[in-house]
């Protein structure tokens, strides 16, 4: 069965991933491609619709990202968003220039509800604007379908050619009826029926994996995180004990995490796979002794992880396939999909392969966003506490301990973090908070306990609210919850005599500590 596809053409906008997610939330499959993608390739994919994203450039400037006019002549509906809207107008003969008044933030927009794009939208609706340039004259054949106090062309359409341009960002949640507009575009303009569903994804993927793997042997590096767990379960459903999972306990996991992973995937767990747990805690502590610099710590942990995995893999012998829990944002962030700059190279995308003897990599989640991976996980019957696990960095507690990592400090931060998470759960805050964890600062200070002087560490509690992890605000946790956590940590965790709450947002902070 050929799936309906909508393509997002990326002009370097901040929200490109959001655009694709929103389309998929409408049950229409969507992928992101760079504006450098050849038109022939786009034609071959037979998309039902094309969306052009925003971008930081001014489209009228020399060398600004562009696309050939042919894109608008394919007979495929095109929706331009912000930069994409401006570019569409410019390429088709309109005028774009620096706006007398730039618009940023939530702006009241008046829309023509007779347009199919704004069907069922309130005539005066709040939208998210972020632009310095504006469309001062629309291209021939276009009519204006939205305006704001400062923006004469907040949207325009050429219905006969199925071309739509909007200056604001429907993909951003601040645009109150943005989802409806995107829904209108994919259903009423592109004519999609919405055939992208998670249950069919699971079924289809299992079938494809069976066909590909045959009687082959499959190896998986299991971290216990959501992505690798879901990938492993998918594979085990498809090929059973042809799969071996290697789980490296590097001693930098959260409290009891190693045992929890083993309980689910090990011999007593629910799946018929071969499970190997390598207890390499001491090996990692030895390598990390005396190292305080965060990047160096990350490198050491990453390299040692590969060495340990490699040794385990050697014992298994040659395998045919290696599975990785790569997900779509990893692909886009690594610069393989869209146009945004390479932010970080993921250890998921290239990294392990060169050290293991295998024929091919399988990445069953490569096209999914995180929330979709979670849906697949639930579909597969993976326990909720694993599916909704807090994001956890690859180097683990290594980057939540400021300064040198020792077994003692790991114990302190594990215990403090476990108390913090427990209290957050009890207070019913776990579903509303973005991410929360305890970190160990490298600060020791004087205190008094039981009439005796102490000279112990300070634990920092962090909790942030974030939609996309690009920016974040420190969360407001009720004072009595913080107090309870503080008092339990001081009482129950030896080596701590001070608890602080981190108020820093991102930027200038990061979500993690190092
Ligand atoms: N750079 C263009 C402008 O300032 C487009 C901005 C955008 O896509 N958000 O108008």
Image: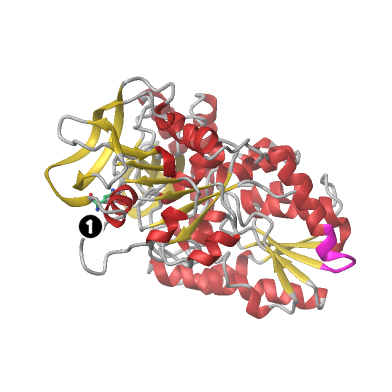
On the question of residue 266 being in view, the answer is: no
Residue beneath the point at 65% across and 75% down: 353
- What are the residue bounds of the magenta stretch? 210-217
Residue 342, above or below 179: below
Is 137 or 243 nearer to us in this picture? 137
Residue 413 image offset from top left, x and y in percent: 49, 49
Q: Secondary structure at mark 1?
A: loop
Residue 174, above or below 70: above
Is 390 or 469 nearer to us in this picture? 469
Which residue is identified by label 1? Answer: 58
* Mark 1 residue CB less than 8 A from any atom of ligand 1: yes
* Residue lying farthest to the right in this orientation: 215
Residue 463 image offset from top left, x and y in percent: 40, 39
Residue 130, above or below 291: above
Residue 58 image offset from top left, x and y in percent: 22, 57
Instruction: Indicate left or right for 121 with 136 as reference.
Output: right
Is 90 or 311 nearer to us in this picture? 90
Inspect the magenta stretch and tell me whether residue 110 lies in it. Answer: no
* Residue lying farthest to the left in this orientation: 100
Residue 488, above or below 312: above
Residue 288 image offset from top left, x and y in percent: 49, 70
């Amino acid at each position: 069965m050929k799936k309906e596809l909508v393509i997002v053409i990326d002009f370097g906008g901040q929200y490109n991933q959001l655009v694709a997610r929103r389309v998929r939330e409408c049950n229409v499959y969507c992928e992101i491609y760079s504006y450098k993608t050849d038109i022939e390739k786009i034609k071959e994919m037979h998309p039902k619709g094309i969306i052009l994203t925003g971008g930081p450039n001014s489209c009228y400037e020399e060398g600004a990202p562009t696309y050939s006019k042919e894109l608008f002549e394919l007979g495929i509906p095109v929706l331009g968003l912000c930069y994409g809207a401006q570019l569409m107008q410019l390429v088709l003969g309109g005028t774009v220039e620096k706006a007398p008044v730039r618009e940023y933030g939530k702006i009241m927009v008046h829309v023509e509800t007779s347009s199919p794009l704004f069907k069922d939208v309130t005539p005066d609706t709040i939208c998210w604007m972020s632009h310095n340039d504006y469309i001062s004259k629309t291209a021939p054949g276009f009519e204006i379908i939205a305006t704001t106090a400062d923006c004469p062309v907040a949207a325009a359409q050429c219905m006969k050619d199925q071309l739509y341009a909007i200056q604001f960002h429907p993909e951003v949640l601040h645009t109150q009826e943005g989802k409806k507009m995107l829904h209108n575009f994919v259903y009423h303009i592109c004519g999609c029926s919405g055939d992208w569903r998670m249950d069919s994804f699971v079924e289809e993927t299992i079938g494809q994996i069976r066909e590909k793997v045959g009687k082959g042997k499959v190896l998986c590096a299991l971290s216990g995180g959501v992505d690798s767990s879901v990938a492993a379960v998918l594979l085990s459903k498809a090929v059973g004990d042809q799969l071996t999972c290697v789980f490296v306990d590097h001693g930098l996991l959260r409290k009891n995490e190693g045992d929890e992973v083993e309980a689910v995937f090990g011999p007593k767990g629910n799946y018929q796979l071969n499970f190997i747990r390598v207890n390499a805690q001491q090996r990692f502590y030895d390598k990390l002794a005396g190292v305080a610099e965060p990047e160096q710590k990350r490198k050491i942990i990453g390299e040692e992880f590969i060495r340990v995995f490699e040794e385990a893999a050697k014992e298994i012998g040659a395998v045919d396939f290696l599975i990785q829990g790569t997900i779509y944002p990893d692909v886009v962030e690594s610069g393989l999909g869209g146009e945004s700059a390479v932010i970080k190279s993921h250890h998921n995308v290239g990294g392990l392969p060169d050290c293991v003897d295998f024929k091919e990599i399988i990445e069953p989640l490569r096209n999914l966003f995180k929330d979709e991976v979670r849906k697949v996980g639930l579909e597969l019957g993976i326990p909720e506490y694993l599916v909704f696990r807090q994001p956890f960095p690859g180097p683990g507690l290594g980057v939540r301990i400021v300064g040198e990592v020792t077994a003692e400090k790991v114990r302190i931060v594990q215990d403090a973090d476990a108390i913090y998470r427990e209290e957050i759960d009890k207070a019913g805050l776990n579903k509303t908070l973005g991410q929360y964890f305890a970190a160990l600062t490298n600060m020791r200070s004087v205190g008094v306990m039981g009439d005796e002087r102490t000279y112990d560490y300070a634990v920092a509690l962090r909790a942030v609210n974030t939609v996309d992890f690009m920016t974040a605000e420190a969360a407001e946790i009720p004072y009595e919850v913080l107090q309870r956590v503080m008092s339990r940590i001081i009482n129950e965790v030896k080596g701590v005599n001070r608890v602080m709450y981190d108020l820093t947002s991102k930027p200038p902070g990061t979500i993690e500590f190092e």
